Image: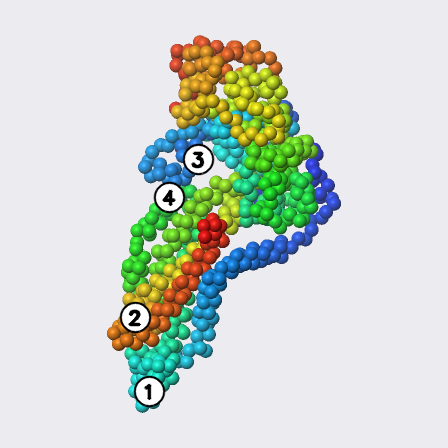
Amino acid sequence: MSQKHERSIFADVEEYESDEEFSAWRRNLRLWRSTLSEQWRLLTDDSLVVAAMAILGGFILLAFVAPVVAPHDPLERMYTESGLIAKWIEPSFLGGEGDFLLGTTAQGYDIFSQLVYGARPALLVGFVAAVMTVGIGTMVGLTAGYYGGYVDDFLMRLVDFVYGLPLLPTVIVLVTVLGAGLDSIILAFVLLQWRTSARVIRALVLSLRERAFVKAARVSGASNWRILSRHIAPNVLPMAFLYGAFAIAWAILTEAGVSFLGLGDPNSVSWGVMLQGARVYSAMTEGTWWWFVPPGVCIALVVISGFLIGRGYEEIVNPELQVEQ
Amino acid sequence: MTDRDTETDVHTDGGTETGADPTGERADASTDDDVLVRVDGLKKHFPVDSGLVSDLMNTIRGEDSKMVHAVDGVSFELRAGETFGIAGESGCGKTTTGMSLAKLYEPTDGSIYYDGDDIANKTGKDLSTFRQNAQMIFQDPFESLNPQMTVYDTVVEPLRIHDRPNQRARVRRALEFAGLRPPDQFFDQYPHELSGGQRQRLAIARALVIDPDFIVADEPVSMLDVSLRAGVLSLLERMTDEFGLSVVYISHDLSLLRHMCDRIAIMYMGKIVEQGPTEEIITNPKHPYTRSLIDAVPVPDPHSQRERVELEGEVGDAINVPSGCRFKGRCEEHIGPVCDQVTPRLERKADVEGGREVACHLYESAEGFDPYAEVGTADADADSDGSARAPGDD
Ligand code: SF4
């Protein structure tokens, strides 16, 4: 190099030590592990968060082992011993005939089996939609915030436009156009919900890119890509996770709402679809609470768990919140 | 991806004949005189309320934004191995000047020559060489370190970017030099686990690890506890000596600059008002602004507790720059219309001995400039650039 000064404390570095094989990979793994275990420790400090994680974990497990747990197929018609369709059967613990834990629906489906299988679409929608929304939102936010100028202008006008659309009505219209089904619900949700994380991440990037450590990286010769990937992205990641946790809850609520209106996937059973069935057959007026209360409770539990975990994580991301409590 | 591309560029260029040429030229230029950095008429203007949101609003409204004249015509030279200080109150443009030296800002006007080449034109291999030779130490060590990066990753980053060998040994050496001992124990710590003094030492190690020739140190100790300053200052002194570095120190603290610098420049509202050998200026200030700055220093002690220089009166308007002398509103020796109308030049004065330049009409120009000849003929001089500024870059 064209060093002008002769003296250098590094003059003999070349000689006395050959480039040692330094396992960057193992070191990174160790650093990641310590960061994660630190966050885990902070997160599990809050007993509410632990409870929420247990509930969510339980539902995830249930979704995986649904065929084992559920006694019947959710869309398999049940028959009584006399050969008639087993409809409006009371739960077995209330003395209903047959062996239906939560009774049957007006069409003769086993409610408990439907409830168990209902965990699948809920969690699928929740996680897929959350990952996609936050993924898109983070990309847009990073690009807009870092590059600024016309790119930022264009992307933020787009965000403003999407902000003008109300969530549920727009999703309903989109699902109607795209055809009922889980994938259209996910698509519609993602198309609308990336806006929040995009805006928040952009604001964060705007402040991060003016920080001196970004300037220091630039002085060291770091390229835009390096600054974005090594200096800015790691600092917005916690915020992205936070929005991910909230997006899970919102997506599940949206799926339930849209299915309740009869726009869910006709070939699968979700909690929203169950509620819709209960409404169509006026289960409410019949007083068969075992049809509509369990799916409602499940939706509430999963959504609340998502919010609680998000809130717990928020306290880690924004330490100021901890002080306020 | 991008930095990989640049790195491969470096290697391929280095192998060819054309790549070697500019290096040769530069070496010639630097043997002619020993000037490492030459700043020539540097100007940096920012849009008012610079910030993306208001930029955006201006873009939407189609308004031409007003400009803050942060740096408005600064020229000086830094010789190899020299330490140069830039002093002034906050907002005088000294930090902007420093950041321009490190190519963090593109000048609105004027040029900065490093080793004879304009740094604005540097790209590819030239830029990469410049980035390895010029480093910066920032004011706030809580801001200048990425909170998500360990000590090792922070210090090794410049070496990774420029693909230097023996990275681990160099990082160890740099940390040791900066006083973070034993270095291996600091490798996996995060900035929040370090004290303020250790953080600034880490920032210094990061600047040194690439073995630079030139460092800009922007208020390197002002954010530190008084008790820690002496240690960091002596580290900076050792750094200058042992590396034979050329350093530009930026500070509001004249006593610190007196301690560290061979020559200093005093800045006021984006211009240098007085410049010369440190001792000459501190012991016998000529410009009224320098005098009031020095009077505001209570104890000439580099480790004193003072944070800021506070002077009487308001700093002038850097958006609508006044005509004539920029210090006229606060000057106690104001001598009439000549001060109001004619911009004083930074020049040698016939009645000021020593190697010093002063921008004030109290003294008689040694270069034959007669400010009184221009009184009344409107200030057609240097200030007309206010209207000729280039709008809206950055
Ligand atoms: S030129 Fe006039 S106003 Fe400016 S510093 Fe000198 S005496 Fe004061």
The answer to whether the residues at label 3 and label 1 have Cβ atoms under 8 Å apart is: no
For the point 60% across and 45% down, the residue is: B194
- Image coordinates of residue A277 in percent, x first then y, are 29, 73
Depth check: give the residue in front, B392 or B141.
B141
In the picture, measured across the screen, residue A107 lies left or right of residue B310, that is left
The residue carrying pointer 4 sits among few (fewer than 14), some (14 to 19) or many (20 or more) residues within 10 Å by Cα, namely some
Task: Report which residue position mark 3 lands on.
Answer: B394
Residue type, numbered disc 2: Gln
Kindly tell me whether residue B256 is visible in this rendering: yes
- Image coordinates of residue B306 in percent, x first then y, are 56, 29
The residue carrying pointer 2 sits among few (fewer than 14), some (14 to 19) or many (20 or more) residues within 10 Å by Cα, namely many
Tag on residue A153? Answer: 4
> To which chain does the residue with label 3 belong?
B
Q: Is residue B167 above or below residue B341?
A: below
For the point 34% across and 46% down, the residue is: A157
> To which chain does the residue with label 1 belong?
A
Quote the CA–CA distance across marks 4 and 3.
Answer: 15 Å
Residue type, numbered disc 4: Asp
Q: What is the residue that sits farthest to the right in this orientation?
A: A16
In the picture, measured across the screen, residue B383 lies left or right of residue B82, that is left
Task: Report which residue position mark 1 lands on.
Answer: A80
For the point 32% across and 64% down, the residue is: A257
- Image coordinates of residue A177 in percent, x first then y, are 29, 62
Q: At numbered mark 1, what does the secondary structure look like: helix, strand or loop?
A: loop
Task: Report which residue position mark 2 lands on.
Answer: A276
